[in-house]
Image: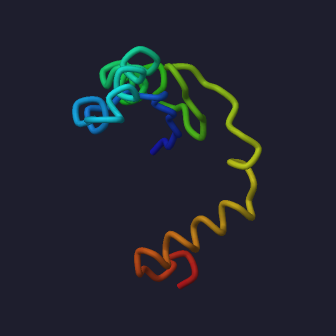
Amino acid sequence: MTVNAVHPGIVATDIVVNRANGRFQWVARLMKILFMTSDEGAKTNVYLASEPTLHDVSGEYFYRCKIEPSSAESRNLASANRLYDTSLRLCGLDDPLKS
């Protein structure tokens, strides 16, 4: 099994673009100009799922179909443990790694 992280980019989703009204319509127009389309945002996910040369690539961070360095915070073990513990608590789960 391989596991990678993906940044889809900043995407002008239909949630905002097609539902903006009144004073927020200018935001929707700006998003259409500056942000990626949903199809463009999905490209990296599709690439990771279908590219044969990535079959054994794991533990990487991808942006626009390329491996990029992740932030220092993403490699901070204490932060990762806090996130893990908080996620378990919010989901009402016991830690399967501690049983």
Residue 71's spot in the image, x, y percent? Answer: 71, 40
**Residue for point 50% across, 35% down:** 6
Left or right of 66: which side holds 40? left
Q: Does any portion of residue 50 appear in the rendered image? A: no
- Tell me, what colour scheme is on the image? rainbow
Q: Considering depth in this image, is 40 or 84 the residue closer to the camera?
A: 40
7 vs 40: above or below: below
Residue 10's spot in the image, x, y percent? Answer: 47, 29
**Residue for point 55% across, 29% down:** 62
Q: Does any portion of residue 97 appear in the rendered image? A: yes
**Residue for point 53% across, 39% down:** 5
Residue 41's spot in the image, x, y percent? Answer: 39, 25
Residue sitting farthest toward the left:
18
Left or right of 43: which side holds 56? right
Q: Considering depth in this image, is 29 or 64 the residue closer to the camera?
A: 29
28 vs 70: above or below: above
- The N terminus is located in which quarter? top left
**Residue 82's image quarter?**
bottom right
Left or right of 55: which side holds 62? right
Residue sitting farthest toward the top:
33
4 vs 44: above or below: below
**Residue 35's image quarter?**
top left
**Residue for point 54% across, 31% down:** 57
Residue 43's spot in the image, x, y percent? Answer: 38, 21
Q: How many marks?
A: 0
